Amino acid sequence: MTQTPTARPMDGTAPARRITEESAEASAELRRRTGTAPCLATVLVGEDPASVTYVRMKRARCRKAGIESRHVALPASVTTAELVETVTALSQDPSVHGILLQHPVGPHIDERAAFEAIAPEKDVDGVTTHSFAAMSFGLPGFVSCTPGGIMRLLDAYGVEPAGKRAVVVGRSAILGKPAGMLLLARDATVTYCHSRTADLAAAVREADILIAAVGRPRFLTGADIKPGAVVIDAGYNEGNVGDVDFESAAARASLITPVPGGVGPMTIAVLLAQTVEAAGRQLGTAA
């Protein structure tokens, strides 16, 4: 009897650790040259437990990378105008080099207006339309952190997108769309899928590289995975499960990211790296 192959897990913790160590070295050198440490401002609206945990984790990683962290906590009742005012003030503060607005911010808030209040040179999370345009055209700027982390993870495991069919399931402005653009820039043939895609399973079966970013637990299963495909699960749902059914997908894929421990660590590592880079640009010296 032929044994069913099992995919190799794409552990994001090791490459993320290397990126964080490099960021710490660059941060120390920047501080030596300028007397100033990179500073990331985090803005949190309300007390959503998951968001609170994410922000706490990011601030802890900042300390490891020698990045100062300034936290701004706002009540869930904050208005769009008040949030925009807060973000604008941080954008104008020369002691702040990067801004992270933790999302979601609540249904009553115009999230896009809040994102657009972030100065492009401080958009280290890559959430503004300026950053998306720069990324799409290959111009200087900051990439969305999760897609940027995905690309670095592919590189760490020797996955070359050129000539491959990449399928992105999800079209959010800070995950699905930028992930597809970054893959396209690396010469992959990209297909975007979403809730209204006709015969989604057929599209998924064509993927040499599959990016799952739909926000629904175990939405994609092994039955629709192309044998030997690389599966990147960018979802995170209640119960520590991703958008892909890991067990069934691992039986067919060649590489697959676990949840947690795959894409997540890479996202934070890219955020740190881009914060140090932003500080170096603003302080007029290479970080």
Image (cartoon, rainbow, N blue to C red):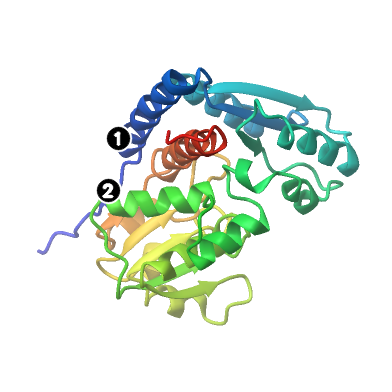
Question: Callout 1: 10 Å neighbours few (<14), some, many (20+)?
Answer: some
Residue at the outermost left position: 1
**In the rendered image, which quarter contains the C terminus?**
top left
- Which residue in the structure is indicated by mark 1? 14
In this image, 172 relative to 92: left or right? left
Question: Callout 2: 10 Å neighbours few (<14), some, many (20+)?
Answer: some
> Which residue is found at the position 53% from the left and 26% from the top?
38
- Quadrant in the rendering for residue 73: top right
Question: What is the x, y in percent for residue 212?
Answer: 48, 59
Question: Which mark identifies residue 62?
Answer: none
Compared with 55, 83 (above or below) is below
In this image, 71 relative to 153: left or right? right
- Which residue in the structure is indicated by mark 2? 156
Instruction: Name the amino acid, label 1.
Output: Ala
Question: What is the x, y in percent for residue 279?
Answer: 53, 33
Question: What is the x, y in percent for residue 223?
Answer: 37, 68
The residue closer to the viewer here, 284 or 97, is 284
Compared with 273, 185 (above or below) is below
Compared with 152, 265 (above or below) is above
Q: Is tag 2's residue or tag 1's residue first in the polypeptide sequence? A: 1
Residue 48 appears anywhere in the view: no
Q: Secondary structure at mark 1?
A: helix
Question: What is the x, y in percent for residue 264?
Answer: 46, 41
- Quadrant in the rendering for residue 49: top right
> Which residue is found at the position 43% from the left and 43% from the top?
259
> Which residue is found at the position 52% from the left and 73% from the top?
192
Instruction: Name the amino acid, label 2.
Output: Ala
- Quadrant in the rendering for residue 32: top left
Q: Secondary structure at mark 2?
A: helix
Instruction: Give the Cα separation between the discs numbered 2 and 1.
Output: 10 Å
- Tags 2 and 1 in contact by the CB under 8 Å rule? yes
Residue 180 appears anywhere in the view: yes
